[in-house]
Amino acid sequence: MKKYTLTVLLALVTLLSFGQDLSYYLPKGYTYNPAVPTPKDVLGYEVGEWHVTHDQLVMYMKAVAAASDRVKFEETGRSYEKRPQTLLTITSPSNLGKLDQIKAERAKLRVPGSSVDIQNMPVVMFMGYSVHGNEPSGANAALVAAYHFAAANEIAADLENIVLLLDPAINPDGLNRFASWVNSHKAYVMNGDPAQRELNEAWPRGRTNHYWFDLNRDWLPVQHPESRNRVKVFQSWLPNIHLDFHEMGTNSTFFFQPGVPSRVHPLTPKKNFELTEKIGTYHAKALDQIGSLYYNQENYDDFYYGKGSTYPDVQGSIGILFEQASSRGHLQESANGMLSFPFTIRNQFTANLSSFQAAKEMRVELNQWMKDFYTEIKNETTADVNKAYIFGAKEDDARSYHLADLILQHDIKVFALNENITVNGKEFQKETSYIVPADQPQYRLIKAMFETRTTFQDSLFYDISAWTYPMAFHLDFMALNSRILNLASVTEVNKSNFAQAPGKVIGQAGAYQYALEWTDYYAPKAAYQLLKAGFLVRVSNTEFSTAEGKTFGRGTILIDKGESELDNQAFFAKLQEIAQAAHVDIHALTTGYTAGANLGSTFMTPLKTPNVALLVDGGVDSGEAGEIWHLLDQRMKMPVTLLPIDAVAGANLARYNVILMADGNYGRLGQAGATAIKNWVSQGNTLVAKGGAIRWLIQNEIGNFALRSVDNSEKGLQKSYADFENATGAKGTFGAIFKANLDTTHPVGYGYQEKEIFTFRNDNFFLEPSANPYANPLVYTADPLASGYLHPSNLPGVKESAVIRISGQGRGRIIGFADNMNFRAFWFGTNKLFMNAIFFGQVIDGGTTR
């Protein structure tokens, strides 16, 4: 009875204080340097008692570095919210004194034939925690890891041969957002009820960064500062092992790689899987010792190279994903019993220890593998008939620049053309085209960026199945053979000073009018600034030509001082300022007597300044909403109101002439919200809707849209129960690239010169074309799949369906998108379609929308 009472009391104390002494996490048999502070010494609480905030995490890392001669603290960059991205380098004091020398030796691993002392080379292990901010057991385990590796006396000799790179919070902004939520709702007497407010964070949740992007999909696209900073660390160190700490559903256990063998990208060598599997035996042994449940070779794949655990695999490194069942707060009921936050932290740190042991014992093998990996690549490049890839867009240097800049971040050489060349009838211009030779250490990564693939070993994908970059950027591209490569005159791009050229005004002050071509990626950025400045801004809805022979296409922006009181020189200076900042050229026109149409023609329509609201909160897809916010705020420098859907019914919608609805569930708008939006559109405004928002419009009889359905049902009398998950999962569209035909004469198509567009879709939302053929500016081709996986049953849903469909509502316009034009910020090629909806929805002829 006394023993039972004591057990209950101990449990009660745990629920009340919920702190675990550091000994709960640390391995047995180690002693620690008393000069190194424990987390409690610095933070004032035990690990797991509270969720560490980012500022506290940084404070502790600095304290450890100040107290230990094994540790170097550095700031590698800043997040959008200006939080420091930090890195601890932990190794022996002697190694700390020669880090540059170690890096230089490691760089030789990428150079076949180099003399490298594999036997004595230190192994390097990167440890990255909580790229998803609301998966906090990783970042909190980083506290324990920093203490143990900095202070444990018994590993001093091991650190002579190991360099640890510890990034305690890959996503500083998301981690801080989540920690603030759970700490502010923590009860001192906890019950683990899943309905507890603490365990159900508010929209947009802490998984993502400031703009609500999943940073664990950005290792390859590197569109965000957090990603660029950490990729720079990776490329400078070339770690042998790359640890990636995550969380999964509360009712799961613990996962470590390798994942499903058939879901590995074909460019990843088989040896990588074998080494990952060997390292996995260390995790299994360690988790067995503490009695934790686990699994591997299920659920998770290694296909998309934009993930933290897959990006290393194509570069001679071993990426390892850990997934811990999440407590989502401090305590939560689960199918496996009460799940405490300290328990989740201990599992993550245990995997950290097992990885350290594997690195220690496999050091020579891992270094040898990296050397062999790059030797094999040299042989592959010699055999490959494709010796380089060329890409460019003659009408726009911005998209070409941004792809070249992306590629450079991965330690890949890029060359600019010195002269125009024509390849297979396609002209590539020197100002807007680049060549990437295949004969480089990053050969496999280069192929992953440029290849198209439509056949796969497995039909299930944890993430996207295609990401062909020139298609994403809407660029001409092709592979080059050795003859053409040798003929091309090129200059290597210097990454350190590579920058997009500033724009300019071509011509003189006092011109009759000025013209901005809409082919430039950043034309909307310039147009907004011109409108904001109070100038008269008109859009040309037809082509026209000057006496000098220059033709301006549909969508060209015509600029006049309007009611501005600026004199000609001041007006010209303002145009110059806007052109430079937006990287666009503005042309002076000397007369309105132009061919095709005169500049005073009714084809030239005045534009209103877009006053934009983006609906957020509730069931809105935060990822897609964030992509829109990022596009407008970061790239186009346009203000946008983030309008909560619960506020719509009572808001003064007259403030806006454009409302954006990302994918999602808009049920919380209710009847009052639906009425408000319907009335607002009818008054002559522009509504832009994507996916689930279109479904909501149909349900509320706003506009004229219809969806297409496909038959995905299983046929037959009996099928194996064991096959159900794979059979149904294969019918999802998780991310593939499709061909579509664009009407370039439609305002939504302004700025595009070619009819073929590559769009990205990652769902089974199919939009039926309008019966009015003028209301379908973008439709899929009859043979739409360009790259990626599509289940045969979904082909009838895609082929010749609408990507964009226009509908009228009263005097207003509704522009419906079936696909995401702003996918993960790297789908530059279709951004303009979305911006056209914002700027030119107001000029779409009402007769084409009925």
Image (cartoon, helix red, strand yellow):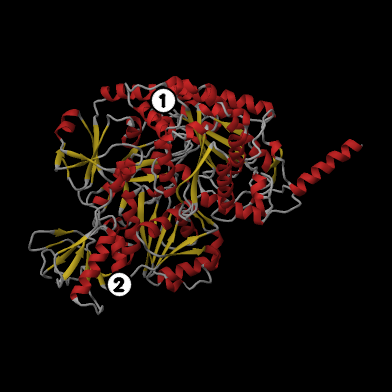
**Disc count in the image?**
2
Indicate left or right for 791 with 172 as reference: left
Q: Which residue is mark 1?
A: 370
Q: Callout 2 environment at 10 Å: few (<14), some (14 to 19), or many (20+)?
A: some
Q: Which residue is mark 2?
A: 533
Residue extending furthest right? Answer: 1
- Mark 2 or mark 1: whose residue is earlier in sequence: 1
- Considering the numbered disc 2 on the image, is that residue within a helix, a strand or a loop? loop
Tell me the quarter of the picture where residue 282 sits.
Answer: top right
Indicate left or right for 660 with 530 as reference: right
- Answer whether labels 2 and 1 touch (C-beta < 8 Å): no
Q: Position of residue 713 (x, y in %)?
A: 50, 37
Position of residue 475 relative to residue 658, above or below, is: above
Position of residue 164 relative to residue 17, above or below, is: above
Position of residue 324 relative to residue 817, above or below, is: above
Q: Judge by depth and name the residue closer to the eye, 620 or 640.
A: 640
What kind of residue is marked 2? Ala
Q: Judge by depth and name the residue closer to the eye, 704 or 221.
A: 221
- Residue at image point 58% right, 23% down: 281
- Considering the numbered disc 1 on the image, is that residue within a helix, a strand or a loop? helix
Q: Callout 1 environment at 10 Å: few (<14), some (14 to 19), or many (20+)?
A: many
Image disc number at residue 160 = none
